[in-house]
Image (tube, rainbow, N blue to C red):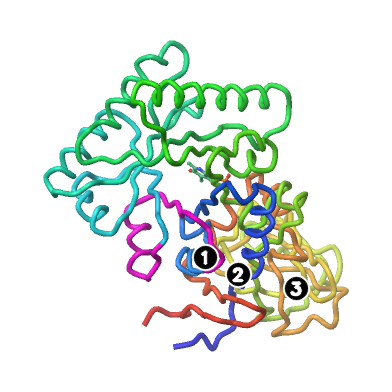
Amino acid sequence: MESTLRRTWAEVNLDAIAHNYKRIKERIGEDVKFLGVVKADAYGHGSVQVSQLLEDVGADYLAVSSADEALELRVNGIHMPILILGHTPKEQVGRLIEYNITQAITCKAKADEYSAEAVKCGGTLKVHIKVDTGMSRLGYLCDNGHFDTGVEGIVEACELPGLCAEGIFTHFAVADEYGEACDAYTRHQYALFTEVIEAVEKKRGVKFAIRHCANTGAVARFPETYLDMVRPGLLLYGYGEFAHQLGLRPAMTMKTTVSTIKIYPKGTAISYGGVFVTDKTTRIGVLPYGYADGFLRSLSNRCSLYTKEGPAKLRGKICMDMCMIDITDMMTVDVGSEVEIFGEKNSIDTLAELAGTIPYELTCAVSKRVPRVYYRNGAVIDKELMLRM
Ligand SMILES: *Cc1c(COP(=O)(O)O)cnc(C)c1O
């Protein structure tokens, strides 16, 4: 059943993602593979649709955070290689092998577990070894006196029965931040990563097929780190200053409509807590868009949303299902008028900054209540159901 309400929806422009892919590909060159990070439902954009697009345009690999996310892609007909970046319970190893899904190996305990399970299933699990070079999250610790034990652990994992070490990777902590200290940190992480690879390859006499580390910040700022494959997420979706610098386009436009208009006299407190009080006769538009849709309540009373007459100030606290804008001087904005929450006109980067967060959090926050409408070649190709019936 199609939504008849035209309440609030997210337009996902797959053409923008195709454009961004092409531009990033031009930047990295023919010989470097492209892994599209589609974890967290492709940062809220819809991982099945984004993965189909990436498969169409010829990307090489996908990455997700869990076995559930990987299987969702497989059951929806995605054939590309998929890497699970996070933890998978060992009980799932048989399914990973069956569905040809690659698993990150992050420590000895997991390598042993996955190996034993793969042997039990009589199959081979494709793995990428994760090296902790300074992110201090997952991976074989190789810094600060841990180099030899780290390398040994990795060699041991690569030689385990039932595992095939196709790749090795690390993750940068501050590649997207400016300043000498951050640049030095990234360069140190990269140098350590390549030293680890060299040591492991020398001990084993086998080279890794795919070495990768470049996230969005590194794709934009550290071309020397591309190795065999890059691994951008945010850049692919076209947000943040690097996307802007590289001429990329934001993929998601969040839209709502004015549901009700009210005129209040001077001195009226608007919404919970009365944090905004009108200082003159004020025309207020009520929008069916609240924090249950993914609007961050911290933006209450401090951002603008974009109407056909330009930016309208948000007034008062954001509610669960609604928020209010000031359209006093915007007489053509009427009930039913579209309002852009973020997109081409109202940059998500500005909203993120006002909320004291990053654009990632805003697209990931778009909730399941908001139907996504997909555009390809300028036309709607897919619409999610408003109600799951
Ligand atoms: C999320 C993630 C990425 C992508 O990060 P962006 O900043 O969006 O480019 C790359 N690698 C790993 C391991 C990740 O977890």
User: Which quadrant, please, contains the C terminus?
Assistant: bottom left
Which mark is drawn over residue 50?
A: 1
Q: Amino acid at mark 3?
A: Ile
Q: Amino acid at mark 2?
A: Leu
Which mark is drawn over residue 284?
A: 3
Q: Secondary structure at mark 1?
A: helix
- Give the image location of residue 238, x and y in percent: 67, 57
Region rendered in magenta: 53-79
In the figure, 271 relative to 287: above or below? above
Q: Secondary structure at mark 3?
A: strand
Front residue (pair 278, 29): 29
The mark nearer the N terminus, 3 or 2, is 2
Q: Using a 10 Å C-alpha cutoff, classify the residue at mark 3 as few (fewer than 14 neighbours), some (14 to 19) or many (20 or more).
A: many
Nearer the observer: mark 3 or 1; the answer is 1
Which mark is drawn over residue 14?
A: 2
Q: Which residue sits at x=59%, y=71%?
A: 10
Report whether 336 appears left or right of 280.
Answer: left
- Give the image location of residue 36, x and y in percent: 52, 54
Q: CA distance from mark 3 to mark 2?
A: 34 Å
In the figure, 276 relative to 387: above or below? above
Total labels: the figure holds 3
